[in-house]
């Protein structure tokens, strides 16, 4: 269940933000925003926050739907789980913003998002464990924000971990968010 929720969040974050910004750039909406005092960092942060709110809302709706059909057991705190999912949504959304910072065509951005999502989905232990995988695969997996999101969510849901016990994963998610937002703002282009 945590893997499916996180994978849904990843696809919504990367496709929802990355694709939209490229479309805005292509149809000239970003060019009009450039004439305002809005900075790239402010614009990207606003896009990220609006997407995070939408992601958390859809997560709650899916969770409630699953709760009606199945009995989902959560050993930890729902508040801790919400905080971890919010940090995960922020990191995945900011990654989507970074991918769309310079994109000028939907086709290129679509390929780039696919290039990122498939390794994340298969190497972040959404579907299976990497226990028997070579060490270089495990090391590469540690670079992916979805790996840290899933690890933290599983610890809270399955093991009853507190926020302090998943603080390492939360710090990585927050770090990915800040790095991607800053890099996205640096590389961001208002024009085609």
Image (spheres, rainbow, N blue to C red):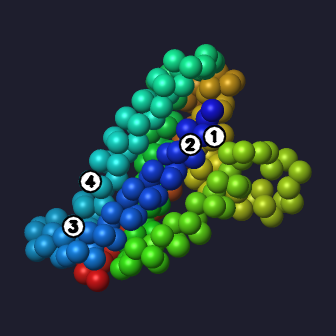
Q: Secondary structure at mark 3?
A: loop
Q: Residue furthest front?
A: 69
Coordinates of residue 174 in the picture (x, y in percent): 48, 49
Circles 2 and 3, Cβ within 8 Å, touching? The answer is no
Circles 1 and 2, Cβ within 8 Å, touching? The answer is yes
Q: How packed is label 2: few (under 14 Cα within 10 Å), some, or many (20 or more)?
A: many
Would you name the residue on which mark 3 appears? 39
Circles 3 and 1, Cβ within 8 Å, touching? The answer is no
Q: Secondary structure at mark 4?
A: helix
Would you name the residue on which mark 1 appears? 3
Q: Nearer the viewer, mark 4 or mark 2?
A: 2
Residue at 44 percent across and 39 percent down: it is: 86
Circles 4 and 3, Cβ within 8 Å, touching? The answer is no
Residue 6 is tagged as: 2
Q: Nearer the viewer, mark 3 or mark 1?
A: 1
User: How far apart, in angstroms, are the residues tagged by discs 2 and 3?
Assistant: 30 Å
User: As drawn, is 21 to the left or to the right of 4?
Assistant: left
Front residue of 147/54: it is: 54
Residue at 57 percent across and 46 percent down: it is: 7
Coordinates of residue 164 in the picture (x, y in percent): 57, 30
User: How far apart, in angstroms, are the residues tagged by discs 1 and 2?
Assistant: 5 Å
Residue 187 visible in the snapshot: no
Would you name the residue on which mark 4 appears? 46
Q: How packed is label 1: few (under 14 Cα within 10 Å), some, or many (20 or more)?
A: many
User: As drawn, is 98 to the left or to the right of 155?
Assistant: left
Front residue of 157/176: it is: 157
User: How far apart, in angstroms, are the residues tagged by discs 3 and 1?
Assistant: 35 Å
Coordinates of residue 23 in the picture (x, y in percent): 30, 70
């Amino acid at each position: 269940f945590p893997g499916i929720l996180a994978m849904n969040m990843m696809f919504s974050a990367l496709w929802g933000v990355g694709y939209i910004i490229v479309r805005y750039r292509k149809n000239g909406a970003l060019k009009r925003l450039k004439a305002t005092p809005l900075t790239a960092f402010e614009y990207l942060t606003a896009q990220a926050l609006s997407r995070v709110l939408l992601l958390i809302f859809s997560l709650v709706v899916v969770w409630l739907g699953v709760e009606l059909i199945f009995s989902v057991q959560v050993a930890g705190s729902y508040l801790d789980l919400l905080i971890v999912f919010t940090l995960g949504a922020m990191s995945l959304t900011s990654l989507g913003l970074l991918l769309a910072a310079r994109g000028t065509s939907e086709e290129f951005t679509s390929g780039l998002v696919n290039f990122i999502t498939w390794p994340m989905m298969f190497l972040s232990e959404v579907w299976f464990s990497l226990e028997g995988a070579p060490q270089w695969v495990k090391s590469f997996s540690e670079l992916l924000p979805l790996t840290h999101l899933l690890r933290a969510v599983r610890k809270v849901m399955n093991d009853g971990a507190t926020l302090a016990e998943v603080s390492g994963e939360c710090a990585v998610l927050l770090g990915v968010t800040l790095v991607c937002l800053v890099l996205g703002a640096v590389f961001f282009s208002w024009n085609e």
